[in-house]
Amino acid sequence: MNRRILISLYKKEILDILRDKKTILMMIVVPLILYPLLFFGAMYLTSSLINSDTQRSYIIGYDEYSETDGVISFFREKAPDHDYKLAYYKGDVSGLEEGLADVFISRSSLEGKPSYEIAYKASETSSQTAAGIAEKLLTEYREKLRSEEFKKLGLDESEFMDPISFEYKDMSSNEENAGYLLGYIVPFLMITSILMGALYPAIDATAGEKERGTLETLLTLPVRNMELIGAKFAATSTVAVAAAVLNMISMSLMGAYFYSTVSAAADSEPIRLISYLPAVLIMLLCVVVFAMFASAVCLSACIFAKSFKEAQNYTTPVMLVFMICGMAGMIPSLELNGTTALIPVVNIALLISSLFKLHFEISLIALVLLSNVAYSLLAIVLMTRVFSSEQILFGDGAGGMKLLEGRKNMKPGQIPGIGDCVLLLSLLLLIILFAGSLLIVRFGSWGLIAEQFLIFFATSFYAWYIKADPKKLFMIRRPRLAAVIGGVIAWIGSYLIVQVMGYAIEQLFPEAFASQQNELVSIWGDDPMWLLILSSALIPAICEEWAFRGFLLGSLKNRYKKHTAIILCGLIFGLFHLSPMQILLVSVFGVVMAVVAYESGSIFPTMLMHFLNNLSAVLISKYRDVLIEKYDWAEDVPLYAVFIMAALGLLFTALGLMLVIKKGRAHQDKADCIE
Amino acid sequence: MIIRSEGLCKSFKRLVKDEKGKKGATLQEEFYAVDHVSLQAGGGEIVGILGPNGAGKTTLLRMLGCLMQPQSGRVIISDDEGREISDPVEIKKHIGYLSGNTRLYQRLSARELMHTIADIYGMDEKEQNERIEEISKVLDLSDFIDNRIERLSTGQTQRVSIARCLVHSPSVYIFDEPTLGLDILSSESIIDFMMGERDRGRTVLYSTHYMEEAQYLCDRILMMYKGRIVAEGTPSELMEKTETKNLRETFRKMIEEEI
């Protein structure tokens, strides 16, 4: 990468963005004008509402019983003490519907002690307020009657009614209290403002360039993809950071104004703003890192679009997801931990929220920041790959989804495209998220089997619909013995590697890891062993391989270079396990299996590997306690054992893959000759 | 400097009517936009690439300019000492590419645009200023060089476009229909420019639909049809071969023969 080119491209992008009126409007006018306007508007509205509410008079309706009981006369007597006016309306029916009264008090039972009903309409503010007033007055009335009774009996009311007394004492500091409120709202505003800042430049730099025809000009220059994307990414991030900082300034000015007016009115202890300094500093870091992440995501979404309009369609779901995840700070039970620190967007929301509560946990802060940087880099690397694809530069965008066309239009024997993979994966995700979860909760192991069959059928249906050649796509081909043996050896190796990695993760995030183990065991319940093996090992080995090493790898290897196809296939397989703790582990295993499938040209060795892997997981989970007891398995593995395991794992993996690759090539050549 | 291509191929997919299928059914079919094209140009000549719409001219020029990767085959530039360059990014340093699709950044001024481009080509500040001054004189940009491009007229924009691909003094120009939709004055300035560069020993590869222009301008003509080069020669050679009086008729006759 040439730094000089990167810098000159970056300068060009920034100049181009800054000279665009729309960007300036989004970046400067919105935060600096809109926030104060909204804020003062809201203040004015509330105060005028409060004023109109206190000034108006409420109509309290009553029936004849409550009048004769003396309730109403008590009301009349007490009314001057309060800052509202009351008018009275006497009727046989409530009159609420007709608007004759805001609240209606009636005696609900005529026998026994007097009991009253406060009829009101929760859908109307004035009626709610009036009901509140009525309740307060009735309570006062009850207390008045009670103390009269006590007096009659000659008892000390306070001693009788309150044998003990207690009071609250808030131990949190003023700063913590204010931080709690800030942590509630700031993450959301922050995330939204960064997203808004990144969105427009991202669209402009990708789809906008395509639409205006300047992209082709750019491509005539001796610029590498990495430089091009790097400059766009840096420029978008800069604008997003600038927008966020402007937003922060605008918000803090509003906050300061609000604080000074409030603290002038209430004589509480002043908040020491200095205690938020670390939070603000770390938050600035968060802003930078999150601006990078948001820019990377926006650019990735827009890079497929041919026009501004199309780009806006792609970014709408991104915006929704970001905004919903941005509200994570408002969910009380959700806290920043090893798991949530890895979930994009949610982690930033939770981190900012925890910072304002003055919680500083360095390891979690580092994890959030690092994971965001890692996600951004990943997105950029993928983008440079995608960007060189001419289908996206000169073609019709992301590539069609064949399922949306009639089957009669399909060309027999075709290979699914990237659009098809995206569509099928979304379908599978829906199956796993909704149908699968429901089935498993309802039917346990049998539900698991049903979910796997759904995956199998969805994949097969898609392949059938587009008239793909099943033998070719799913690599149904008798494997050579060497490939099978190599696959098994590679599995042993990758199993060891995954164990070591699992051990490392367990050391880092013990809680999250433990909860995962329990989840699996709870699905199984008391099912017999054969059912567990069938539902958790055999059937997933067939059905998941069918979808991932079959359909997905078969399509990817047609579009991308070997390494890209294998790594993408492994990563997507990892992501589909939908648990942050597992993504990395499963991805490693997925990549190894993808190599075996790719090199052997057959899906069967990986089915065997997958089966062995799940089988060992079933056996170990089921007999964990027995094994620990019988063989005296140490809970704390010595460090040298871990290293030996890692070394052995790498050795076995390499050995197995070598066997598969060498023998697999010979096999493929032979097969090609026959064809 | 000599630019040459060896067996360039590029295929695209398109939908065609399915004759066997039901009414309205379509099939996706792969076709070669450029089909094994080998050519060579260099040493002060203007090579015209002619052909009907969809013949593959733009795709060929895009591959020659390294904007597009060929499916097979390669593009090579060899310099005067016979050194061969095949890395696309390195090749681009010797090429000035201009087409109807290479638009300019509307929000920058011509000067800023040229500075950015010169920066990318690795020229230092002094070199940049001298070069921009020179280009501005040749193409008469001085009146509007500091205005934003969005405020310029079509003719002025076209001159800036040429200025853009001149910045790094390329030795090979690739122009894809450079005079399309321009008035006589603007297209004349482009034609003058191409002739001037040829006289300076530069090579120009260009495609056009204006036969009179090609006949007058080109030293050599490549006739393309369905992705292949079907005829090659000087305008007069081609006219002789087809026994026609002007290039317009030559073109028509050749295409009719191909069909």
Image (cartoon, rainbow, N blue to C red):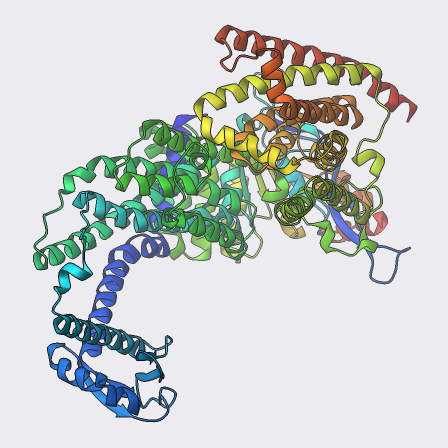
Give the residue drawn at x 58%, y 24%.
B87
Q: Is residue A307 positioned above or below B234 on the image?
A: below
Give the residue drawn at x 40%, y 55%.
B150
Outermost residue, bottom side? A91
Outermost residue, front side? A153
Q: How many marks?
A: 0
Residue A576 in percent (x, y) is at 61, 37
Left or right position of A527 against A279: right
Give the residue drawn at x 48%, y 39%.
B165
Evaluate whether residue A126 shows in this view.
yes
Left or right position of A618 against A191: right
Residue A166 in percent (x, y) is at 18, 51
Residue B189 in percent (x, y) is at 49, 49
Evaluate whether residue B84 shows in this view.
no
Left or right position of B150 against A409: left
Residue B258 in percent (x, y) is at 84, 47
Left or right position of B94 against B38: left
Query: In the image shown, does A190 or A72 lie closer to the viewer?
Result: A72
Q: Quadrant of the C terminus of chain A?
A: top right
Q: Is residue A391 positioned above or below B74 on the image?
A: below
The image quarter containing residue A99 is: bottom left
Q: Is residue B225 positioned above or below A553 on the image?
A: below
Query: In the image shown, does A9 or B84 lie closer to the viewer?
Result: A9
